[in-house]
Image: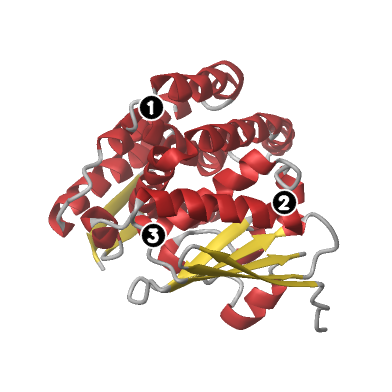
Amino acid sequence: MRRAVKHVELHRIGTTELRVVSDVDIGETAVVQAEEAVIRTYMQRGNWPHRLVSLFILNDLQPLIRQVGSNALPSGRSAALDTRTVINLYDLANPDACHVFVNQQMMIKEGYWDDMLAVRGLLAHEHAHPLAENATTRASRELAIDLNLDQKPTETHVRLEGLLSQLIEQLCLTAPREVFTNLLAITSGFGEAMLHLNQRNVANACMSLEGRAKLRELLSQDVAQGNRPADSVGQLLLVGDLEGYCGLAMELAPFDRAGQPAAASALADVLNQDLFPQLEPRFAPTFAAARRLYAELPAELSLADLQIWSQQIANIIIGAMRDQGLMLRCTVREA
């Protein structure tokens, strides 16, 4: 079924043409204003390459999904399109244009739609992706991981193997792009917006703990009924913790790199007080080790050097799982 287009606008911002298409009833004007402000700020920085920006403010991203597929994302960003709040589609070989899609349903679900400072942070982050390209981010696209169980597999172990493979790919290979994107947004004048956005994300993470407690209860019931080995509970919970929360290290490390310790502490203090004590004991040191490596990641690594760095991240995750009794091997290799 075709959607009715309710708003079509054309704006000129310096040398850039902003085309707006929307199928939402209300609220699009504030998003357009936030987008204009973001473009102007990047223009003032001096490395703005786009002559055309297409901004699609949609009830959901089904129109885009029908064109490119539900799991197709640029630059290896590892979330299905229908779960994204904002996404920027661009071609590094042709920087004249980019296409920004705003998903109203997911924005409302995450609490962003009526929070213009958070919207500004989201838009600043997405526009920073092509602007933050460097040798390290380019090399990250040339790597892949191989992960295998190092023990006799059970059905649960095979499932965990698949989850960990996706997680390590995100933390090793996608992370450099996210770290440098966040860093560029912070250092381009969006530090306040990025901190506010991450504070919302941390608050959302803390609110998700109720669901984790219910999962632990269900897993414990399975053990009591003889349907699950006891050691699998900690393994499942740790994988869930890593999958759900370890990516926050990519948000804290850019503040470390930008020389904004107060902002980093504002996020870390909440995590240390309200989130980490509720997770598996191995999570906090794993998070800290990843955050440190993200904070120290050089911008001009060769492929070989990034492979070594990425293997360090993989080893941190594999070591945490080994401590939980799940024996795995993971190798980072050239794709």
Position of residue 32 relative to residue 284, above or below, is: below
Residue indicated by mark 2: 30
Residue indicated by mark 3: 48
Helix or strand or loop: what does disc 2 sit on?
A: helix
Helix or strand or loop: what does disc 1 sit on?
A: helix
- Neighbor class of circle 1 (other Cα within 10 Å; few <14, some 14-19, many 20+) is some
In the picture, measured across the screen, residue 335 lies left or right of residue 267, that is left
| Coordinates of residue 42 in the picture (x, y in percent) | 43, 51
Q: Residue visible at 38% across and 27% down?
A: 288
- Answer whether labels 1 and 3 touch (C-beta < 8 Å): no
In the picture, measured across the screen, residue 18 lies left or right of residue 60, that is left
Residue indicated by mark 1: 288
- Answer whether labels 2 and 1 touch (C-beta < 8 Å): no
Q: Residue visible at 76% across and 44% down?
A: 114
In the picture, measured across the screen, residue 286 lies left or right of residue 31, that is left
The quarter of the picture where the C terminus appears is: bottom left
Q: What separation in Å lies between label 1 and label 3 (alpha carbons)?
A: 34 Å
| Coordinates of residue 105 in the picture (x, y in percent) | 76, 57
Lower sequence index among marks 2 and 3: 2
- Amino acid identity at mark 1: Ala
Q: Is residue 281 visible?
A: no
- Amino acid identity at mark 3: Trp
Q: What separation in Å lies between label 2 and label 3 (alpha carbons)?
A: 22 Å
Q: Residue visible at 52% across and 72% down?
A: 72
